Image (spheres, rainbow, N blue to C red):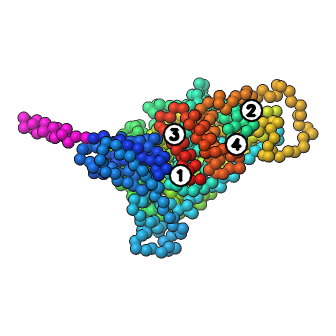
């Protein structure tokens, strides 16, 4: 026994003698702009950290370690020799010439410069972390909302949108130095990527409503009506039991590093937060669909992790078959009064079985009646099918995020777990009635694919968006006040039977905001309304929520080259955004400023 103790003591002394050293530094790009989310790892030891929103990192490694590796999708990986306690790194964008033709028989293969995976060609380049072919990414056409006269059309009705995929997808393109397709820019998803500090609901409603009416920062003499909904926050321990079915695309198109490998790492983040009352299943699809993990308790993490580690990519993409099997699995393990949800992870490239967007839409529309919600997580680039994934999320009573790095996965599946996974209100609709005595014309900024007919507001059979626990929803109306001349307003003769005389009482209100929602397990709509008073409030006196969200709106309009961008400039966005950041513990708003700087340089 004494010998054993002596041996242990020698081992401990030896470990201490090895020593450690802490290395700090900053990672920037060629334009000296900080890069967040860079993986910094020891070359010869299994130790790694990521850079924060200021591009900074701190890593503790053994004294014997001589090099660090710096890696981020879209940038050339670099190795730096440790010659001190501080190591800075400059990453250059890895610019790849896109392969114009997608299929192997349409290109010439030379000297093993290309490799073939499931009938598609990818280029073999040193440090290559991503393949991008902009010609085969697909986005739904976005026709921007225009101005409507309040006198003739006083009602505006739309479904809320808590999807955030557009913002992180745009971030990916900006970080790669790529041209952003206008239809990839959905302004409302950019605005709603950020959480705003709206007040928590104080009554039985699942969300609060906040409104501000003030000056428009991009169009002189115009106004904005800023609407904020704040979902009730529920502590993780108080969330109902979850029945989660992961539906994973493991087809050949998912073989790249920023697809299946990133997907596997993302799922593991969520698994670490599952409880014993939660159940998880994994359904995969490639040439066919199958179950690789039958329903398993959330605390049996070793079994779950083993199933994830065994996933490999290959074959064609039978997405429709996989979706049907996932719903079948979720329905068979349905938890009454629980959170029953499918989480689909894919690049959207369905090419076997049901692949037509209309057929997929019909399938999901029917399946949502089961009470199973659908969350969609998009991965990858090049053959990315944003249009298909967006349809599935919209029709499946769910939400949609794009995962471009492990930090985004952590934000979606850990930090915002309740909002992503647990629905507190479904079919949430907003209808704004504008007062024509104050409002000459109005337009909703974004939400083009969420517009509803006015009669849909009271129609409880009409599908709308879902709100998760703790989620915020922000909407902005651009308003041309009565008496302001603008080319956006087309003049018509006064109507014979419309009221013409306006008195002071008519101008006390700008609008009435009406909302309608259902409980997650309910089928009858509940109304919740507020009135917006016509008060003079300068832009500088508005909340950080107002000024930061309108900065994001300006950025979206500039990226789209919108006809409504007015006097928006990158410098104005940066100045206003910096002043309105407020508390930014996770650094998302600081990262936004960095992206605006990148766009300014690349324009």
Q: Which mark is residue 174?
A: 1
Please name whichever residue, 212 or 316, is drawn nearer the observer in this view of the structure.
212
Please name whichever residue, 392 or 525, is drawn nearer the observer in this view of the structure.
392
Given this view, does label 1 or label 4 mark the residue nearer the observer? 1
Q: CA distance from mark 1 to mark 4?
A: 26 Å
Q: Secondary structure at mark 3?
A: helix
Q: CA distance from mark 4 to mark 2?
A: 14 Å
Percent x, y of residue 392: 57, 51
Is residue 9 within the magenta segment?
Answer: yes
Q: Which mark is residue 590?
A: 3
Given this view, does label 2 or label 1 mark the residue nearer the observer? 1
564 up-or-down from 520: above or below: below
Q: CA distance from mark 2 to mark 1?
A: 38 Å
Is residue 602 within the magenta segment?
Answer: no
Question: Given contact means CB atoms under 8 Å apart, are the residues at marks 1 and 4 in contact?
Answer: no
Q: Which mark is residue 596?
A: none
Please name whichever residue, 112 or 82, is drawn nearer the observer in this view of the structure.
82
Q: CA distance from mark 4 to mark 3?
A: 26 Å
Which comes before the other along the chain, label 2 or label 3?
A: 2
Q: Which mark is residue 511?
A: 2
Q: Secondary structure at mark 2?
A: strand
Which comes before the other along the chain, label 3 or label 1?
A: 1
Crowd rating for badge 2 (residues with CA inside 10 Å; few <14, some 14–19, many 20+) = many
Magenta range is 1-20
Query: Mark 4 = which residue?
Result: 444
Which comes before the other along the chain, label 2 or label 1?
A: 1
């Amino acid at each position: 026994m004494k010998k054993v103790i002596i041996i242990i003591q020698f081992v401990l002394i030896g470990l201490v003698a090895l020593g450690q050293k802490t290395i700090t530094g900053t990672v920037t790009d060629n334009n000296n702009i900080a890069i967040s989310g860079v993986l910094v790892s020891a070359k010869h030891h299994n130790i790694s950290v990521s850079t924060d929103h200021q591009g900074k990192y701190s890593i503790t490694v053994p004294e014997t370690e001589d090099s660090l590796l710096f890696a981020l999708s879209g940038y050339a990986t670099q190795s730096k020799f440790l010659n001190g306690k501080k190591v800075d790194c400059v990453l250059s964008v890895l610019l790849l010439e896109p392969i114009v033709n997608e299929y192997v028989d349409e290109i010439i293969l030379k000297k093993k410069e290309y490799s073939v995976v499931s009938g598609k060609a990818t280029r073999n380049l040193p440090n290559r972390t991503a393949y991008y072919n902009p010609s085969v990414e697909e986005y739904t056409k976005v026709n921007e909302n225009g101005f409507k006269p309040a006198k003739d059309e006083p009602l505006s009705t739309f479904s809320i949108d808590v999807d955030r995929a557009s913002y992180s997808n745009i971030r990916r393109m900006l970080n790669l130095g790529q041209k952003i397709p206008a239809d990839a820019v959905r302004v409302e998803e950019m605005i709603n990527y950020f959480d705003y500090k709206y007040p928590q609901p104080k009554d039985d409603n699942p969300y609060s409503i906040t409104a501000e009416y003030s000056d428009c920062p991009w169009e002189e003499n115009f106004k904005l009506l800023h609407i904020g909904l704040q979902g009730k926050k529920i502590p993780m321990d108080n969330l109902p039991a979850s029945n989660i079915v992961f539906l994973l695309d493991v087809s050949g198109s998912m073989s790249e590093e920023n697809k299946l490998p990133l997907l596997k790492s993302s799922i593991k983040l969520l698994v670490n937060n599952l409880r014993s009352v939660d159940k998880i299943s994994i359904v995969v699809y490639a040439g066919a669909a199958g179950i690789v993990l039958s329903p398993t308790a959330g605390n049996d993490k070793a079994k779950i992790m083993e199933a994830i580690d065994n996933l490999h990519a290959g074959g064609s993409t039978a997405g429709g078959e996989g979706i049907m099997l996932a719903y079948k699995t979720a329905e068979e393990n349905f938890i009454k009064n629980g959170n029953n949800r499918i989480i689909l992870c894919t690049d959207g490239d369905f090419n076997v079985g049901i692949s037509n967007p209309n057929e997929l839409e019909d399938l999901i529309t029917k399946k949502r009646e089961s009470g199973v919600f659908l969350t969609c997580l998009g991965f990858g680039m090049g053959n990315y099918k944003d249009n298909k994934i967006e349809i599935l999320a919209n029709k499946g009573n769910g939400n949609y995020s794009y995962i471009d790095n492990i930090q985004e996965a952590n934000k979606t599946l850990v930090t915002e777990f309740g909002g992503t996974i647990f629905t507190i209100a479904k079919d949430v609709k907003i209808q704004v009635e504008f007062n024509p005595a104050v409002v000459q014309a109005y337009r909703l900024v974004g939400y083009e694919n969420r517009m509803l007919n006015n009669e849909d507001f009271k129609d409880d059979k009409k599908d709308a968006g879902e709100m998760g626990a703790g989620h915020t929803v922000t909407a902005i109306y651009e308003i041309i006040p009565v008496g302001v001349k603008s080319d956006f307003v087309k003049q018509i003769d006064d109507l014979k039977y419309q009221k013409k005389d306006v008195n002071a009482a008519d101008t006390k209100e700008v609008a009435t905001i009406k909302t309608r929602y259902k409980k997650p397990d309910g089928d009858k709509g509940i109304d919740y309304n507020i009135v917006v008073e016509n008060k003079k409030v300068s832009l500088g006196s508005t909340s950080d929520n107002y000024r930061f969200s309108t900065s994001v709106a300006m950025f979206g309009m500039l990226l789209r080259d919108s006809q409504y961008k007015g006097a928006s400039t990158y410098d104005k966005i940066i100045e206003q955004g910096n002043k309105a950041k407020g508390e930014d513990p996770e650094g998302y708003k600081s990262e936004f400023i960095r992206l605006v700087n990148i766009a300014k340089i690349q324009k």
